[in-house]
């Protein structure tokens, strides 16, 4: 009964179609530059392009994404005006990209949320979302290093689509969920499998939340800039070799269902991050298992959103 109801809900959401038509690509970033004091807000001028300094365009804008999102439509309208204007672009080589969101109230994660990832493990598709979390202190920028903790010998990769909340809500209906979404970004859910699967009473938290275990970025791509977040190619490469390759259409529970489910338990706040699960190809289920080592380079890429690149140190 639960499965049939969920299928009906998914069908209704799909029948509505994606309620936003793609606009000119709005890619919000947090960045630093040598000539600027502290973090600033910007617009990435296309996937892989330079950065427009939003704080220079309007000095009244906040300098953190959290404050930007909390102010809602007022700040978004300024960003739209900046996007339409012909503004100077800082070369990418002259800026340091930070995670698009830092210090959110919570980082919510979803386990076994890809049909093909469940097949990889030979486990049934979950009937309801499997929720765990990472501490916000695990977040780092899109090109920062992932630090191997001395406590773990089994650090693994996981590329994920991340949802960033834009509006506070509790007990949100699935049909209203997208009104609470600011946009999407690429996440790397780095995982210490020994601590996730065997230590700490098999509770996942510690294995997921070492410092640097949540690279995000490069940009918060607003929801109206994406045709359909549930039909995007998603892949991960380790040292240039493709290790994960799938599509977000393989997600068991889509964004709307996840927000409705999670918001039954907790209030969602602007800036909250939801990692929506990983496709197959992770190291722990390879024969023999493969784990990250010092010097490796991990590239996580999602169509329309961009690529994050993290060296392992």
Image (cartoon, helix red, strand yellow):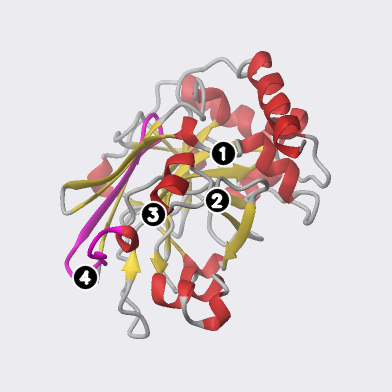
Q: CA distance from mark 1 to mark 4?
A: 31 Å
Q: Position of residue 266 (x, y in %)?
A: 77, 56
- State whether residue 24 is above or below residue 77: above
Q: Which residue is mark 3?
A: 158
- Residue receiving disc 4: 293
Q: Earlier in the sequence, mark 1 or mark 4?
A: 1
| Sequence-first tag of 3 and 2 | 2
Mark closer to the chain start, 2 or 1 = 2
Disc 2 target residue: 63
Q: Position of residue 293 (x, y in %)?
A: 21, 70
Q: Nearer the viewer, residue 251 or 77?
A: 251
Foreground: 65 or 155? 155
**Disc 2 vs disc 4: Cβ atoms closer than 8 Å?**
no
Determine the residue positioned at 51% across, 17% down.
23
Chief secondary structure of the magenta portion: loop
Residue where numbered disc 1 is placed: 252
Q: State the extent of the magenta-drawn residues as a range.
A: 286-306
Mark 3 and mark 2 residues within 8 Å of each other at the beta carbon: no
Circles 4, 3 touching at the beta carbon (< 8 Å):
no
Q: Is residue 177 left or right of residue 153?
A: right
Tell me how far mark 3 sits from mark 1, CA to CA. Answer: 17 Å
Element carrying mark 3: loop
Q: Is residue 148 left or right of residue 87?
A: left
- Decide whether residue 282 is among the magenta residues: no
Image quarter hosting the C terminus: bottom left
Instruction: Tell me the residue at 76%/31% (across/down).
Output: 5
Identify the image quadrant of residue 153. Answer: bottom left
Q: How many marks?
A: 4
> How far across and down, in percent of the image, does residue 1 sit?
77, 36
**How many angstroms separate mark 2 from mark 1 (CA)?**
36 Å
Residue 220 appearing in the image: yes
């Amino acid at each position: 009964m639960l499965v049939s109801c969920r299928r009906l809900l998914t069908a209704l959401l799909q029948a509505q179609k994606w309620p936003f038509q793609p606009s000119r690509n709005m890619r919000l970033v947090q960045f630093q530059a040598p000539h600027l004091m502290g973090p600033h807000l910007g617009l990435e001028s296309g996937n892989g392009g330079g950065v427009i300094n939003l704080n220079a365009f309007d000095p009244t804008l906040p300098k953190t994404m959290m404050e930007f999102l909390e102010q809602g439509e007022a700040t978004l309208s300024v960003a739209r005006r900046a996007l339409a204007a012909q503004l100077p672009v800082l070369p990418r080589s002259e800026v340091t990209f930070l995670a698009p969101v830092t210090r959110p109230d919570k980082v919510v994660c979803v386990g076994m949320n890809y049909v093909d990832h469940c097949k990889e493990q030979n486990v049934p598709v979950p009937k309801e979302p499997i929720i765990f979390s990472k501490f916000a202190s695990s977040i780092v920028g899109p090109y920062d290093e992932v630090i191997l903790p001395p406590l773990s010998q089994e650090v693994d990769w996981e590329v994920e689509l991340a949802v960033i909340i834009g509006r506070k809500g509790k007990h949100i209906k699935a049909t209203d969920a997208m009104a609470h979404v600011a946009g999407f970004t690429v996440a790397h859910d780095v995982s210490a499998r020994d601590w996730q699967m065997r230590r700490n009473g098999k509770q996942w938290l510690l294995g997921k939340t070492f410092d640097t275990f949540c690279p995000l970025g490069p940009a918060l791509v607003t929801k109206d800039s994406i045709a359909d977040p549930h039909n995007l190619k998603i892949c991960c490469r380790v040292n240039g070799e493709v290790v994960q390759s799938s599509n977000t259409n393989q997600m068991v529970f889509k964004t709307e269902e996840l927000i409705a489910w999670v918001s039954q338990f907790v209030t969602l706040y602007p800036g909250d991050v939801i990692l929506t699960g990983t496709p197959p190809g992770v190291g722990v289920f390879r024969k023999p298992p493969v784990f990250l080592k010092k010097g490796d380079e991990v590239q996580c890429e999602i169509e329309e959103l961009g690529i994050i690149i993290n060296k392992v140190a």
